[in-house]
Image (tube, rainbow, N blue to C red):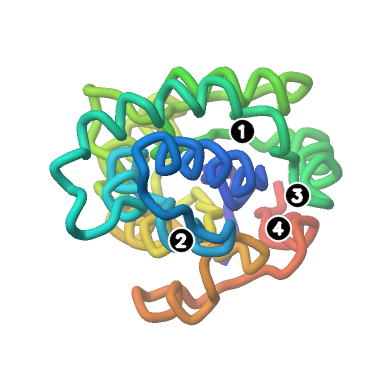
Amino acid sequence: MSGRAVIFDLDGTLLDTLDDLADAGNTVLAALGYPTHPVASYRQFVGDGVANLVRRALPGNAQHDFERALTLMREQYAIHWKIKSRPYPGIPEMLDGLVEKKIPLCVLSNKPDRFCQLTMEHFFGRWPWAVVMGETDEFPRKPDPTGALAIAERLGIAPGEFLFLGDSPMDVKCALSAGMNPVGATWGFRAKDTLEEVGGKVFIDRPEELLSLIARP
């Protein structure tokens, strides 16, 4: 496997956002009078959009409060999004290496686009990004491949020449459906075996290992 362009997932791949997501979610639950969750539980809540995160965080008998909880979650995450979040160790060096190799860098996230753009500018603004795409009404969320294919078309690069680095089954499914090459980030929110179950075969344990998968000019 090799590639000459890279699509990254954001949360759990480039950026460790778990504490901020958990703090926002637990603030919402407490405000509504529901039990909160340990931070680790949010690993299973994230990955396919804020609405699904809220549904999973609410107790089963509290789904009638979904709309109110979703509104509060958006308000709280607007406060919490950059308090504890940090790039994973090795990510800046990996990005430097890819830029040196003149590899186009892209992000495809299920995070709402406004927060995706804010997050990328705040934490990763010093690197050149060819495309940054969060959740919008224009494209379905991952694992639907439409967004990934739109990125490939915009760059004029065949899907089969992309590496798609992510930490969740959604990323693997999206990459495979788009005809791209999925690479599992084992440092992220989901266990390696959950990615293997949906067809993941290539994994890296440290960000710098991605550089060895880049096609030679």
Query: Which amino acid type is shown beneath numbered disc 1?
Result: Pro
Residue 176 image offset from top left, x and y in percent: 34, 61
Q: CA distance from mark 3 to mark 1?
A: 20 Å
Please name whichever residue, 192 or 176, is drawn nearer the observer in this view of the structure. 192
Label 4 with label 1: CB-CB less than 8 Å: no
Indicate the quadrant containing the N terminus: top left, top right, bottom left or bottom right.
bottom right
Say what secondary structure mark 4 lies in: helix
Mark 3 packing: few (<14 Cα in 10 Å), some, or many (20+)? some
Q: In the rendered image, which quarter is residue 124 located in?
A: top right
Q: Earlier in the sequence, mark 4 or mark 1?
A: 1
Q: What residue is disc 4 on?
A: 210
Extreme-front residue of the structure: 33
Q: Mark 2: which secondary structure? A: loop
Q: Are marks 2 and 1 in contact (CB under 8 Å)?
A: no
Above or below 37: residue 159: above
Front residue of 86/143: it is 86
Whole-Å distance between the Cαs marked 2 and 1?
22 Å
Label 4 Cα crowd, 10 Å radius (few <14 / some 14-19 / many 20+): many
Q: Is residue 124 above or below residue 140?
A: above
Q: Can you give x and y, in whole percent of width and height, for residue 205 in the image? A: 72, 69
Q: Are marks 3 and 2 in contact (CB under 8 Å)?
A: no
Q: Which residue is mark 2?
A: 168
Report the number of discs: 4
Is tag 2's residue or tag 1's residue first in the polypeptide sequence?
A: 1
Residue holding disc 3: 88
Rounded to the nearest angstrom, the CA distance separating label 3 from label 2 is 16 Å
Residue under pointer 1? 104
Tell me which numbered mark, 3 or 2, is placed earlier along the sequence. Answer: 3
Residue 137: horizontal and vertical position, in percent? 22, 23
**Residue drawn at x 70%, y 58% as measured from the top left:** 210
Q: In the image, what residue type sits under mark 2?
A: Ser
Disc 3 marks a residue whose amino acid type is Tyr
